Amino acid sequence: MSSATVTVMQKNLKYQLKSVEKVHVKIWEDAKDASIHIARSIALAIRQKQQEGERIVLGLATGSSPIGVYKELVRMHREEDLSFSNVITFNLDEYYPMSPTAQQSYVRFMHEYLFDHVDINPKNINIPDGTIEMDEVEAYCKQYEEKIDLVGGIDIQLLGIGRTGHIGFNEPGSWRDSITRLVRLDGITRRDAIKDFGTAEAVPYRAITMGIASIMKARTVYLMAWGQHKAAILQKAVEGPISTNIPSTFLQEHPNVKVIVDKAAATELTRVKTPWLIGMCNWNDDLMSQAVIWLSQQTGKSILLLTDNDYNEHHLSDLIIEYKSSYELNIKVHNQLQDTITGWPGGKPNADDSRRPERATPAKKRVIIFSPHPDDDVISMGGTFLRLVEQGHEVHVAYQTSGNIAVHDYDALRYIEWMQEFGGAFELLDKENKTSLERAAKQLRSQSAQKDSPEIRQVKGMIRRGEARAGARFCGLKDKQIHFLDLPFYETGTTRKKPLAKVDIEIIKGLLEDIKPHQVYAAGDLADPHGTHRVCLNAIFAAFEALKKEKWMNDCWLWLYRGAWHEWPVHEIEMAVPLSPMELYKKRRAIFMHQSQKDTPPFPGNDEREFWERAEDRNKATAAQYRALGLSQYEAIEAFRRWKF
Ligand code: F6R
């Protein structure tokens, strides 16, 4: 292809992209780099205003999305003399009612992540007050709005996007001309907030938020979205029609909005999901498989039944030109998918492995299954776990975190009372033990603490350990193959975790060095870039990086499974392990060992079903997709993707 043709293609693409994406979107490889980019743009604007002797007004957001931006701003303040002396801030929102000292208050959040670490004048900080009397709220909101206008309006507004499509707390139904006011939170938003408040009942029903009109007046707007769980709503916000049902779509009318997303949040955008619908593509084998699988799903035909006509009618004619004919293309993709299926996840001994996902040798492999929480191993790959043990591999499981915050208080109390009774009956408790058990029981009964004491955390951690041990033993492991890593980053007693530190990485490294595995399985769940799964994965990546020069590492393959929330799309699967109905039932029993997570786990996420139900539905759905594409019929399939460094 000549460079002139490429330029024309790119120009056309830009033009066609504009017809689909109604705001300017930039996709970054990961959230960290994207956040640094935003922080630097803000820092530049602050410095420019400083040089001109002027103030700058920032509109700030809370939640997980802006944390990386604040982190970089703090770093620049510490290391690059970035001063906030000319900065005035207005926060978007606050729960109502809310005490500023409460764990979940946005006042506390802002101080923790930004204000306490920079030289901003406290008088320049404005955050809606969640303690205002109800009959004064209206006047207070009016003043808040006027105050923004009085300082000349917002120069740069930072926004996250909620799963309802809200910006600020402007939930579906918010009007274009809405200003700062008291609002009712959407059910989905309240559900998402359970992770911060502990229980559904504790989440406030209301909030004070700047309105859509207040946000639209800002001169520059950055909308951030990180992680797969934002992909569907982001697509609607960027490509969908403007509607009060999705308030973020109003941003399409803003003259200077920049939507900054990571790769995971971009997965539902047309240019990523079905780029052939936008313009000409630079085809490679991965994109080709993606297109053929999409075409098969679109037409409802299995891959081998697709015709030239199907390709032509679905914007894929250039694919046929590139790969000669639909006949060859179909066979190629069909066979590729066929080659992902294996009942031998540890490799099939004495078999030709040239087209198999795993190596045949060594026939007996050393394997580590890393599980971020104590139940992810069985939920996400219980069938493969059982199979690996049955096929004689030396399987180890490593529980990365204690999972102690995800145990209900009433369960912890039950165990403590059991210890008190048992210890009392056999006179096993000294005075000190008795007092500490009493203290813990009292705290659990009163439900007054915002944060578990170290004793309660220990009890909750022990409950989860016992369950994990039972699950791993059920899968056939001996106790010496079960490792509890209790990574320190997790041990805060709240949902806000410490950043990943060297000590966490050293623990993972230590285990890898001890076992020198041929296979490592890890949760490749990129759904939440700030969540525990992602941090646990980063710890593994960092340990691999540190060990990459070791000879045994050449033989160490890393397979990623996905957590309880979503699955690999079919075109990304590199190993598909089919499960029979009996194996699926056995997997269910392994999940049942996690009694504290049954019925209603403390952190169910956005899915009402129990973990075993989600796992089974997901594994059955993968099998159904393979079947619909024209491959053999299986009860269920567990899916993996290999991570190549
Ligand atoms: C926070 C706010 C919300 C969040 C949104 C996304 O001040 O107004 O609109 O930006 O709910 O939250 P995260 O970033 O936690 O996904």
Image: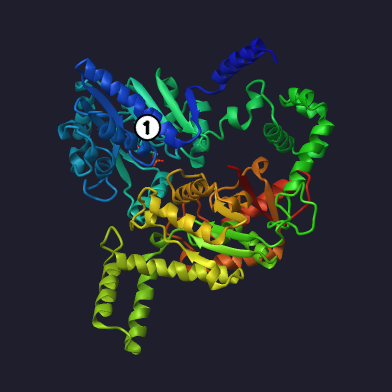
Give the left or right position of residue 640, taking residue 197 as reference: right
The front one of 344 and 510 is: 510
Q: Amino acid at mark 1?
A: Leu
Residue shown at 70% from the left, 16% from the top: 1
Residue 254 image offset from top left, x and y in percent: 40, 20
In the rendered image of this protein, does residue 552 appear above or below residue 125? below
Give the left or right position of residue 478, taking residue 108 as reference: right
Does residue 410 appear anywhere in the picture? no
Residue shown at 38% from the left, 74% from the top: 414
Look at the numbered disc 1 and say if its residue's Cβ is closer than 8 Å to ligand 1.
yes
Quadrant containing the C terminus in the rendered view: top right
Residue shown at 52% from the left, 61% from the top: 514
Q: Label 1, on which residue?
A: 159
**Image quadrant assignment for residue 156:** top left
In the rendered image of this protein, does residue 322 appear above or below residue 63? above
Does residue 50 appear anywhere in the picture? yes
Count up the numbered dots.
1
As helix, strand or loop, the secondary structure at mark 1 comes to strand
Residue shown at 64% from the left, 20% from the top: 279
Give the left or right position of residue 461, taking residue 105 as reference: right
Residue 198 image offset from top left, x and y in percent: 36, 56
Q: Quadrant of ligand 1?
A: top left
The front one of 366 and 287 is: 366
Residue 495 image offset from top left, x and y in percent: 36, 53
Residue 157 image offset from top left, x and y in percent: 33, 27
Disc 1 crowd rating (10 Å Cα; few below 14, some 14-19, many 20+) is: many
